Image: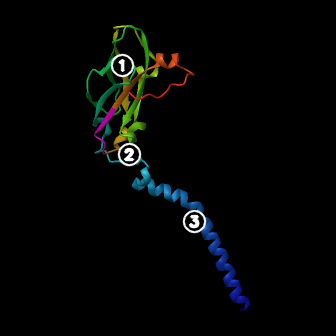
Amino acid sequence: MNNKNRKYTAIAVVAIIFGMISLSYAAVPLYDLFCRTTGFGGTPVDANQISDTKNTENLTINVLFNSDVARGLNWDFIPTQRKQVVKLGENNLAFYKAKNSSRDEITGVATFNVTPPKVGKYFTKIDCFCFEEQTLNSGEEVEMPVNFYIDPEIAIDPNTKDVKSITLSYTFFNSSEEKQHKGKIKKNSIE
């Protein structure tokens, strides 16, 4: 191989290495641009890219309300309404009703769940009875509010824009019982 061929080979190798390094640095911003443009990979599309015909302020979604009571909690617990049609981005108020049907004062705590799971990041509870334990005297009945809103971005995200209804579900557990048995091992039994 003569010196001229070695020179061209060296220049070609350096150019290829430089090109590969440049492409590796550009890959992340280029992929990000591709995802934002197409919505690929669950990347939300920028709201400014959506035409004015898609006005999310006027969109509504159905919110269904569900309630359950764990075994060992002698409460009646129901939503006061099963469904609300809510505007995206607006504050909404729903109520659940709880009644202590036992002879004793009972403290309960509620856990919540939103389905489908993919909408969880767009469902925001501003104030909720589930944030604190609830103590009810024997026979006491109360209405418990939940103040929430649904982020309008739900209508823009390609993964959630097809969702027409959301279920908000609560389960109440007896937290008094947990305090009494804290540190004790419960034996499994067949009922």
Label 3 environment density (alpha carbons within 10 Å; few <14, some 14–19, many ≥20): few
Residue 124 disc label = none
Name the N-terminal-most of marks 1 and 3. 3
Disc 3 designates what residue? 23
Residue 190: percent from left, percent from top: 41, 29
Residue 149: percent from left, percent from top: 37, 29
Disc 2 designates what residue? 157
Query: In the drawing, does residue 48 fall left or right of residue 22?
Result: left
SS of the residue at dot 1?
Answer: strand
Residue 128 to residue 115: above or below: above
Question: Which kind of residue does numbered mark 1 sit on?
Answer: Pro
Q: Which residue does the image show at 39% across and 44% down from the upper left? A: 47
Label 1 environment density (alpha carbons within 10 Å; few <14, some 14–19, many ≥20): some
Name the N-terminal-most of marks 3 and 2. 3
Name the N-terminal-most of marks 2 and 1. 1
Q: Which residue does the image show at 38% across and 45% down from the upper left? A: 157
Give the farthest residue toward the right: 3
